[in-house]
Structure formats: structure tokens, C-alpha cells
Image (cartoon, rainbow, N blue to C red):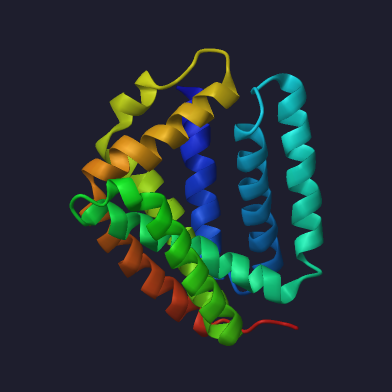
Amino acid sequence: MEFVILYLSVNIAAGALACFMGKRLFYIVLGVLVFLGVFNIALTATDGSPASFVIAAVLGIIAALLSKYAYKAGVFLIGFFAGAALGFFIGMLVPNMSDYLMIIVVLAGALVGLAAVRWCDLFVRIGTAYTGASFLVSNALAAVLAFPQLLEHAVPGDAMATFDALAGFIGGEFSAAYSTPLLIGTLVLAIAGVVVQGNTKVNK
């Protein structure tokens, strides 16, 4: 149970920070997102051994540190993550589109990422707010609506296996079952995040 609570707490807290303070914490949020993206890709491409876990973490850290020096690329990545999340929800809502889900996710991510580069400041707020809201809402709803199922995915004594199982369940079976409330909740919270960020002064 401890691993489940830790996983949910970290994702909800990180989502809240990104949603409401994403512009102020842009480089930190960007670094976290880049780390998670590179880490997950690297870990998926390996055999899941302790050595591959370390390699994936190192690659994620390096990518996160370098992201600060590529502002436009960073803005694109934030937009891409937000667009990909939106594309995922749209793909889950539209009947008979599951076979094309990855195409929809990548296409939506690319389009939103390119638009983000064109309108940087606005999309930094929209991108971080939406990405943060998607983390917050999905994990919070899963905690409220499917906590017993989350406990069933816990692997005793293995935090990483538990986190991987939880991510798979929340992003897959749970999101498919509750796609409409997830999308509505994410959009409402994202709008609130954009407004809050727009009224927050940022020291440059």
C-alpha cells in the first residue's frame, strides 16, 4: 500500500505544481517531463534489469539538464506532451479509433508542439497547465474511484514494478473506462491553471 500511496502522492503533487506554477517553474517542469520521457523510453527499450534502470536514469538526467539550453525545443516538448495527452483522450473517446491511437497521439502532439513554438508564452502556460492537470486528474480520480484495483497492482517489496504496473493501469484500463470524466476534469483544471499562471508575475 505504501508504494501505491507514494506513487499517487508524487504524481498528484507534480501535476498540481505544473498546472498552477508551470510558467514560474518552467525549466524545472520541463526538466521533469524530459527526464520522465527519456527515462521511460530508455527503460522500455531495455530488459528492466538494475543496470538498465541506472542507465535509463542517467540518460534522463542528462536530457533534463540539457533541456534548459534549448528553449524553443523545450517549448515544443511541453506543447507536444500536452497535445499528446489531448490526443490520447480524443482517441479513447472516438469509437473504433484504438488501432490508430498512437498516430493520433503523435500527430496531436506534433501540431500542438509547433503551435507552442509560434506562441511561446501562451503555450507555456497552456502546455504546463494541461500536462499538470492530466497528471493530477488521472491519479486523483484513480485514487477515489479505483483504489482497490490500484492495490491489486502493487508488487510487494518492488517499488519500480509497482510504479510500472500502476502507470499501465491508470493510463490504460482506467483511462479507457473513465475517459469522459477524465477529459472534462482535465480541461476544467487546465483552464483554471492557465488563469492562475496568467495572474502570476514571473521574475526573469
Residue occupying image coordinates x 51% and y 13%:
156
Kindly indicate the quadrant of the structure image that contains residue 66: bottom right
Could you say where residue 87 lies in the image, as x and y percent from the top left?
37, 61
- Numbered-mark total: 0
Name of the residue lying farthest toward the top: 156
Residue occupying image coordinates x 75% and y 55%:
64
Could you say where residue 29 lies in the image, as x and y percent from the top left?
64, 61
| In this rendering, position of residue 44 left or right of residue 172 | right
Q: Can residue 164 be seen in this view?
A: yes
Q: Which of 31 and 5 is in front in this view?
A: 31
Could you say where residue 203 lies in the image, as x and y percent from the top left?
72, 82
Q: Nearer the viewer, residue 152 or 47?
A: 47
Residue occupying image coordinates x 51% and y 68%:
110
| In this rendering, position of residue 59 left or right of residue 95 | right
Residue occupying image coordinates x 58% and y 17%:
158
| In this rendering, position of residue 128 left or right of residue 154 | right
Q: Looking at the figure, which quarter contains the N terminus?
A: top left
Q: Which of 193 and 176 is in front in this view?
A: 176
Rendered position, 19 above or below 150: below
Could you say where residue 167 lies in the image, as x and y percent from the top left?
46, 36
Q: Is residue 20 visible?
A: no
Q: Looking at the figure, which quarter contains the C terminus?
A: bottom right
Rendered position, 59 above or below 84: above
